[in-house]
Image (cartoon, rainbow, N blue to C red):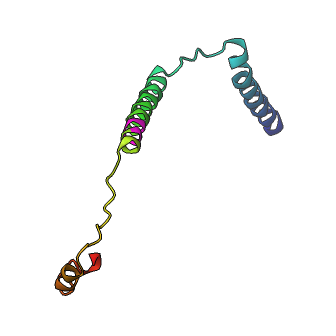
């Protein structure tokens, strides 16, 4: 009797496992796309696009700037050069 009971329990377990495996094939579960994730990704991408556009505008503005070059003018009078040797502008002499 013990052997019959064990075989019957194993058969029930096997049938239950097969039923669990085959049930989704007979009646597939409906799956809904996660729209919230897709819209979140779209929002992030549009934010990145706007930041790239603003960086491009900033880069174009910097490239359009013409920064003045500071070139020291040579002194014409040597006496002026001697007068400013001790001053903070001695490097221009």
**Residue 90, percent from left and from top:** 24, 81
Q: Count up the numbered dots.
A: 0
> Residue 76 location, x and y as percent?
26, 72
* Camera-side residue of 51 and 73: 73
Does 70 sit left or right of 1 as displayed?
Answer: left
Q: Main secondary structure of the magenta part?
A: helix
- The image shows residue 23, relative to residue 87, as above or below, that is above
Residue for point 47% across, 29% down:
41
Q: Which residues are magenta?
A: 56-60
Q: Position of residue 36 (x, y in %)?
A: 44, 23
Work out whether residue 4 or residue 58 is closer to the camera in this orientation and state it. Answer: 58
Q: Residue at x 66, y 15 (%)?
A: 28
Which quarter of the figure has residue 3? top right
Q: Which one is nearer the viewer's eye here, 68 or 92?
A: 92
Magenta stretch encompasses residue 57:
yes
* Of the pair 26 and 6, the residue shown nearer to us: 26
* Residue 38 locus on image (x, y percent): 49, 24
Figure quadrant of residue 23: top right
Q: Residue at x 28, y 75 (%)?
A: 92
Residue 43, by quadrant, is: top left
Horizontal placement of 65 versus 3: left or right?
left
């Amino acid at each position: 009797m013990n052997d019959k009971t064990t075989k019957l329990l194993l058969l029930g377990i096997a049938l239950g496992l097969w039923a669990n495996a085959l049930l989704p094939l007979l009646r597939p579960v409906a799956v809904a796309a996660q729209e919230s994730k897709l819209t979140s990704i779209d929002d992030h991408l549009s934010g990145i696009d706007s930041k790239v556009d603003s960086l491009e505008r900033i880069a174009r503005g910097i490239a359009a700037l013409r920064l003045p070059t500071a070139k020291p003018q040579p002194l014409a009078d040597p006496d002026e050069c001697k007068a400013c040797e001790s001053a903070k502008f001695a490097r221009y002499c």
